[in-house]
Image (spheres, rainbow, N blue to C red):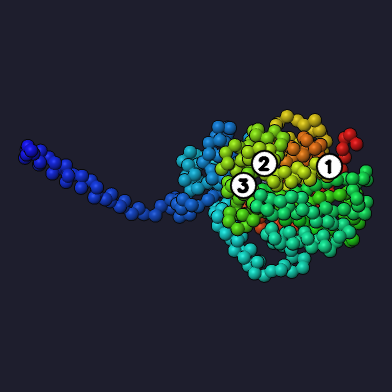
Amino acid sequence: MASTPPVARWLALVTLLLMVALFTYERPEPPEVCPDPDRESDREQDANARIAVRVWPHSERERAELTALAHDVWSEHAGTELDLVLDPAGVMALRSRGIEFTELVPDVLGVAEQERERLRGVEAARPPAPGAWFSEYRDLETIHAYLEQLALVHPERAELRTIGHSLEGRPLQALRIHGAGSVGAHGDRSRRMFVNGGLHAREWISMMVTTCVADRLIRGYDEDPQLRRWVDEVELWVLPVANPDGYVHSWRRDRYWRKNRRAGHGVDLNRNFGLAWGGDGSSGKPASPIYRGTAPFSEPESAAIRSLMETERFDAHIDFHSYGQLVLHPWSHTRKRSSDHRRLRQGAEGIATAIAAEHGERYRLISGASLYPASGTLMDWAYGTQGVVSFVIELRPRGGTGFVLPPDQIAPTCDEGLAAVMSLHRASERPHG
Ligand code: 0X9
Ligand code: ZN
């Protein structure tokens, strides 16, 4: 065996020493910088922090770029504002690109945590004092028990029906409310209406408002002649929690959860209906907040609403959501005018006027697609395939803290919801009998 020449041995030793030095080298700590008053706050430094901001993109391209920065989209208005949830790096990106924005909620998770804390106290103080039920948000179990109680105490005008079950097997509970004139229903005298809340899990005010509307109509019947006349002429079905699995998840795990719970990623039920399914403003990606599912009505919750509407042949419908204070009319999937445009617009105007008469709050009228396109929605399917005069109402707030609305807003928002539902009477006149 030939021996290694001394120069080569020396070179090998130097290389080894260099490698050891390289691997053991530690980057020196950066020198302490003096606290900079303009420096991002500690909150913004925390990568897990979430900040809700409102931006006003100047172009479709900018809108898409800003949306790509976000963890979540809370609300959209085509051509104007866009409410996004960003992390601190996202906020820094806005700043460095000189993009104008306002902070809606500086600490999104903190707001949810505060609400949770408050509700823990409420939980401990159960059951609510009489008359205080609508002073606070209620979980699924409590809402369902309340609906049951209403039907039990007033069997002559309210009946509880299970219209189907959620993916995780929870009942979809609806109250059928009728007065003297509408008993037996399907008769000529009665108008047939359907309202639902809670298609989106995080929009808690919609579950509370629909429950409260049912409560006011059922319990107010004996004292209020105006209410009595209305209930006598109408058969109204109220489904407060259209997405019970999502609602439970929003209470227990993630306050800002929107979809149902399909395979953990969820399906946006308001993209799962069978009109223009798969079109603009819906996504084929399971992780998207507007994931449409694998097929129209792939989800038991939307399929149950389809069966109810096909069986009951309603004249009018409101799908309650939040937030933004808007009254939306068809279409949602296209900016083309519907053939009933004038009538739908008048109906929406009637709703907005009735709402404003309550507390002076203005709800803006706009067609769904003019707000932003959305395909496979309940409103479009109800109107387009069932001939139902159908609206979406985005309840309070206009911006504020978004989906986490202070509980003292439940009662006034319920006044607005009731006014909207009662104004449907006029909007529901069918053009062809
Ligand atoms: O996007 C939705 O499903 C609804 N808005 S929400 O913020 N509550 O999620 C609105 C659907 C109405 N249609 C259109 N905006 N096109
Ligand atoms: Zn919604």
Q: Position of residue 123 (x, y in %)?
A: 65, 66
Q: Which residue is mark 3?
A: 262
Which residue is found at the position 36% from the left and 54% from the top?
A: 34
Of callouts 3 and 1, the N-terminal one: 3
Q: Secondary structure at mark 1?
A: loop
How far, Cα to Cα, is label 3 from label 1? 29 Å
Q: On the rendered structure, is 119 left or right of 311?
A: left
User: CB of mark 3 within 8 Å of CB of mark 2?
Assistant: no
Which residue is found at the position 54% from the left and 50% from the top?
A: 51
- Which of the pair 277/401 is nearer the observer? 277
Which residue is found at the position 93% from the left and 54% from the top?
A: 180
Q: Residues within 10 Å of mark 3 (few under 14, many from 20)?
A: some
Residue 313 is labelled as 1
Q: Which residue is mark 2?
A: 298
Give the amino acid type for the residue marked by disc 2 in the picture.
Answer: Ser
Picture quadrant where residue 187 is located: top right
Residue 53 is labelled as none
Q: On the rendered structure, is 408 left or right of 10?
A: right
